[in-house]
Amino acid sequence: VQDLAQAHILALEALKDGKSRAYNLGNGQGYSVKEVIEACRAVTGHPIPTKVGERRAGDLPVLVADSTRIKQELGWEPQYDDLKQIVATAWKWHQSHPNGYNK
């Protein structure tokens, strides 16, 4: 979560210079829904029930974000490349902010 927030800050700062671009944010790796669910189960210790069905019409089998542009233009790189570590950082934040940010 923190590295994504940093990417947003860098993009906002770039707007001050008149730059307006869209950037993909990712670590160049793709994960299946099953892999993400298994990582979430492992990190949280919760069973997370699932219902398996056919892929929806129009859904691509693989999507991977290429963050080359934001790395070249703004110097951003993802901090994490391990799925369980990514989930663990999000889970840690959620546990310390169960209601999100208070107003």
Image: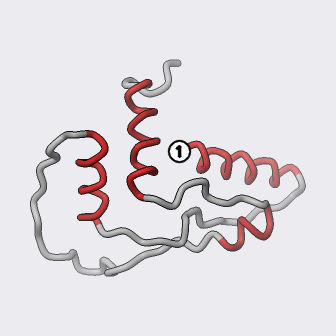
Q: Quadrant of residue 24?
A: bottom right
| Closer to us: 88 or 49 | 88
- In this rendering, is residue 37 above or below 22? above
Q: Is residue 28 left or right of residue 34?
A: right
Q: Residues within 10 Å of mark 1 (few under 14, many from 20)?
A: some
Identify the residue at image location x=46%, y=59%. Answer: 82
Residue 47 point in image, percent of width and height: 14, 44
How many marks on residues? 1
Residue 19 point in image, percent of width and height: 83, 61
Identify the residue at image location x=23%, y=48%. Answer: 41
Which residue of the protein is positioned furthest toward the top in this rendering? Answer: 103
Q: Is residue 12 left or right of residue 44?
A: right
Q: What residue type is disc 1 on?
A: Val
Q: Quadrant of residue 45?
A: top left
Residue 53 point in image, percent of width and height: 11, 70
Label 1 residue SS: loop
Identify the residue at image location x=86%, y=49%. Answer: 16
Residue tagged 1: 1
Residue 92 point in image, percent of width and height: 42, 34
Q: Quadrant of residue 56?
A: bottom left
- What sort of colour scheme is used for the picture? secondary structure
Q: Is residue 87 left or right of residue 6?
A: left
Identify the residue at image location x=82%, y=54%. Answer: 14
| Closer to us: 26 or 35 | 35
